[in-house]
Amino acid sequence: MAGTGEKVSIQDRLAGRVAYVLGGGSHGPARPGESLPMGNGRAIALRLAAEGATVVVGDIDLGRARATVDALAVPGLAVEVDAADAESCAAAVAAALGAYQRLDVVVCNVGVSGREPIKAQSVPEWERSETVNVRSHWLTAQAALQPMLDRSRGSFVFVGSTAGLLSSRRSLSYEATKAAQLAVMRHIAVRYAARGIRSNAVVLGNIDSALVRREFGEDLTSARAAVVPMGREGRPEEAAAAVAFLASDDAGYVTGQSLIVDGGVSAAWPTPPSALQRG
Ligand SMILES: NC(=O)c1ccc[n+]([C@@H]2O[C@H](COP(=O)([O-])OP(=O)(O)OC[C@H]3O[C@@H](n4cnc5c(N)ncnc54)[C@H](O)[C@@H]3O)[C@@H](O)[C@H]2O)c1
C-alpha cells in the first residue's frame, strides 16, 4: 500500500478476492505451438488467478470452463451457464456465491459477433446479440450487486469492443449491443459509485482469440493485423492484463471508464500512405 511501507507485488494484487468470469472458456484452435486454445475469457481467468484471486468460470460448455479451471494457478470452480437464458445467468452467480459466500470481482466477457449489416440484419440475430452481449451482462451484474453492496465493495469489468465506439460496417447488431453494454457499465458506475462499487470496461480492438481463429480463419486474422497501427493483433493476455488492473485496487479511483486496448486503432486518422513523409 502506498505510504505504509508494506510491499505488495503484482502477483498478490487480487489475493483473497473471489472473481466470476462469465464466458471463461474458449472455443477454437489454439495458437501454433500451444495446446490450450486461448480467448479473452480464459486469459482473464488465468490472469486473475495468477494475481491471487479464487476464480469461478462460467461457460455454456462445462468442459471448456473446466479446461480453464484446470489451468488456473489456484483451485477454482467451473459452472455451466447459458448467457442467453435469464435464469441461468442468475443461477450461475448464485452458485458462485454459494461456493465462496462473496464476489469481489465480476467480469462479463461473453459476447457473440454478428455478421449482418443493416440491409441483412435479421430480428433473430439481433435478439441473440442483444440477449448475450447486453442482457446477460446486466442480469449477471444485477444478481451479484446486492451482496457487493452489503459489503460496500465490488468491481465489475465488462469486456467491450471498439465496435461499440466505431463502426466497422460489418455487423449492426454487434455495434449496437457493444455500445449498449458500455451504457450498462456506466449506469452501474454512477449509480453505485458512492457505495463502494466500481464498474469499468475494456474496449478491445483486434485480438487473436481462439474464437476469431475459428470464425475468421488464418487469412483474415493476418489481414486484421495489417490494419492496426502496431501492425499486429493483440493477445488475449494483453486484454487480461487490462482487466486485472481495472478489477484491482490499483484502479481504486477509476470508475465508469472504457479502457481502450486496440494497438492504436482508435487513435488513427486514416491517411493515404502517399500523403505521408518518410521516416
Ligand atoms: N477477439 C476479438 O478480436 C475481440 C475484439 C473485441 C471484443 N471482443 C470481445 O471479447 C469477448 C470474448 O471474445 P473472444 O473472441 O475472446 O471469445 P472467448 O474465447 O473469450 O469466449 C468464448 C467463450 O464464450 C462461451 N460462450 C459462447 N456463448 C455463450 C453463452 N450463450 N453462454 C455462456 N458462454 C458462452 C464459449 O463457449 C467460449 O468458451 C466478447 O465479448 C467479444 O465481443 C473480442
Image (cartoon, helix red, strand yellow):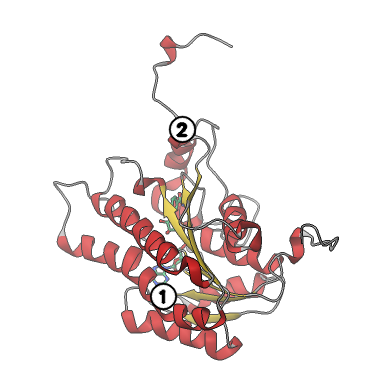
In the visual, does 148 lie left or right of 60?
right
Image position, residue 70 (x, y; %): 65, 75
For label 1, the SS is helix
Q: Position of residue 96 (x, y in %)?
A: 53, 84
Q: Residue at x 54, y 9 (%)?
A: 278
* Quarter of the figure with residue 7: bottom right
Q: How many marks?
A: 2
Mark 1 Cα within 10 Å, few/some/many (few <14, many 20+)? many
Q: Is residue 235 above or below residue 157?
A: above
**Location of mark 2 (residue):** 267
Query: Relative to 181, does residue 85 appear above or below in the rendering?
Result: below
Determine whether 135 is above or below 166 in the image: below
Tag 2 or tag 1, which sits nearer the N-term? 1
Residue ID for mark 1? 140
Q: Nearer the viewer, residue 3 or 212?
A: 3
> Which quarter shows the N terminus?
bottom right
| Kind of residue at badge 2 | Ala
In the rendered view of the protein, which quadrant contains the C terminus? top right
- Residue 272 at x, y = what percent? 39, 16
Question: Residue 57: x and y, percent?
Answer: 54, 75
